[in-house]
C-alpha cells in the first residue's frame, strides 16, 4: 500500500500502446496504489513535443513525478521520488 505522501504526488506517464515497458510501469504503479495520468504520445503530438523538449528523449515510458522526469522504467528512481 502506498504511503499518504506518495498518493499526493502528481504523476504523469507518457506512453504508447505498443510499449512493453510502459505496460510494466503502469502495472507497477497500480500495484503500489499510485494514481497517475496517462498520456498516449502516439495520439497526442503536442504532448510528444513537450516531452522531448523537456527531456531531450523520445523514448517511453517517461514518468513525471512532481515535475521530475524519469525516463524508462527505473524502479529505484520512481520509488525514491514517490517516497516508497
Image: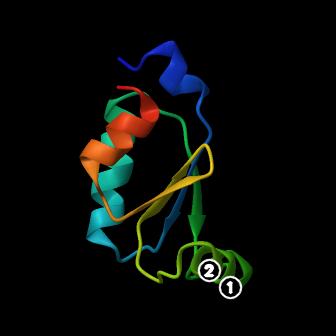
Tell me what residue is drawn at x 40 percent, y 20 percent: 2
Numbered mark located on residue 63 in the image: none
- Quadrant of the frame with the N terminus: top left
Quadrant hosting residue 79: top left
Which type of secondary structure does the marked residue at label 1 adopt?
helix
Q: How many marks?
A: 2
Is 26 positioned to the left or the right of 8 in the image? Answer: left
Tell me what residue is drawn at x 36 percent, y 36 percent: 80
Tell me the residue that label 1 is attached to: 45
Tell me the residue that label 2 is attached to: 48
- Quadrant of the frame with the C terminus: top left
Taking depth in this image into account, of 83 and 36 the one nearest to the observer is 83
Which type of secondary structure does the marked residue at label 2 adopt?
helix
Image x and y of residue 43, in percent: 62, 80
Q: Residues within 10 Å of mark 2 (few under 14, many from 20)?
A: many
Q: Is residue 31 above or below residue 75?
A: above
Is 10 positioned to the left or the right of 46 in the image? Answer: left
Q: Is residue 58 above or below residue 20?
A: below
Q: Are marks 1 and 2 in contact (CB under 8 Å)?
A: yes
Image x and y of residue 11, in percent: 56, 44
Tell me what residue is drawn at x 26 percent, y 44 percent: 76
Taking depth in this image into account, of 20 and 66 the one nearest to the observer is 66
Q: CA distance from mark 1 to mark 2?
A: 5 Å
Amino acid at each position: 500500500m502506498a504511503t499518504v505522501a506518495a498518493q499526493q504526488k502528481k504523476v504523469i506517464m507518457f506512453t504508447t500502446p505498443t510499449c512493453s515497458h510502459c505496460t510494466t510501469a503502469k502495472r507497477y504503479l497500480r500495484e503500489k496504489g499510485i494514481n497517475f495520468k496517462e498520456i498516449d504520445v502516439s495520439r497526442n503530438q503536442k504532448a510528444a513535443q513537450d516531452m522531448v523538449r523537456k527531456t531531450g528523449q523520445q523514448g517511453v515510458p517517461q514518468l513525471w513525478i512532481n515535475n521530475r522526469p524519469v525516463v524508462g522504467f527505473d524502479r529505484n528512481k520512481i520509488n525514491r521520488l514517490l517516497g516508497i
